[in-house]
Amino acid sequence: MFTGIVEELGEIMAVEELTDAARMTVHGPVVTSDARPGDSISVNGVCLTVVEATAGSFTVDVVAETLRRSSLDKAQVGDRVNLERAAALGQRLGGHIVQGHVDGTGTVVRRTPSEHWEVVEVSLPPELERYLVEKGSITVDGISLTVVDVAADSFTVSLIPETLARTTLGFKQPGEVVNLEVDVIAKYVEKMLGARHV
């Protein structure tokens, strides 16, 4: 489990394409300071298992299902990525409950700068729209954000200078793909209410 509070911007150092997967090596000195094989690290919102950790970098295997459902299928050497270690029991939950299981992808539609923040509009797959509510939570590339507005095919979030400076949303441009994870609590509520009406 994660909180959606990005710890650092990492950089993809290597991508090896395998027959049904990919092996990636990512530079991230903060998240690797205590990383061991078997640990979970969120890479742009995707929960991945460390298979090797060295000073300042870690390697993960990304299976075909994950490549199909996320933007990691387009990952290239030099790409910057949001990194977060798994949450530890007893720590503050600064964002919201994030599983690291991507529900779909969207694209940045437009960016509207203001004096002290920036509004970013992201396209939304139709099957995810029912899980979003104004002032609710959404995870974009592993970043816990508050939904400002929801339309039939998009939503907006407001980004403060800290988020712009410390995450990939500071430089993602219209047309670029982002990973989306809706609030898992909404999915559980939907399932429980559906079971009551069967």
Image (cartoon, rainbow, N blue to C red):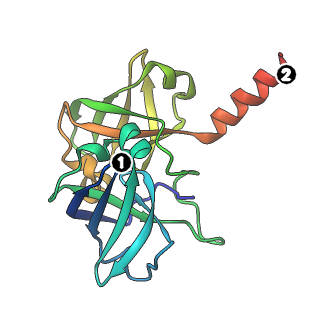
Q: Which amino acid does label 1 sit on?
A: Asp
The structure residue drawn at horizontal position 26% and vertical position 51%, both measured from the top left corner, is 168
Q: Residue 195: where, in percent of width, then height?
A: 81, 24
Picture disc at residue 196: 2
Q: Is residue 91 above or below residue 153?
A: below
Give neighbour class at mark 1: few <14, some 14-19, many 20+ (Cα, 10 Å).
few
Q: Residue 151: where, in percent of width, then height?
A: 42, 17
SS type, badge 1:
loop
Q: Is residue 174 left or right of residue 96?
A: left
Q: Label 1 belongs to which residue?
A: 20
The structure residue drawn at horizontal position 32% and vertical position 30%, both measured from the top left corner, is 122
Q: What residue type is labelled 2?
A: Arg
The structure residue drawn at horizontal position 59% and vertical position 71%, both measured from the top left corner, is 88
Quadrant where the N terminus is found in the figure: bottom right
Q: Residue 166: where, in percent of width, then height?
A: 28, 59
Pointer 2 or 1: first along the chain:
1
Q: Residue 186: where, in percent of width, then height?
A: 64, 34
Q: In this view, does 190 lie above or below 183?
A: above
SS type, badge 2:
helix
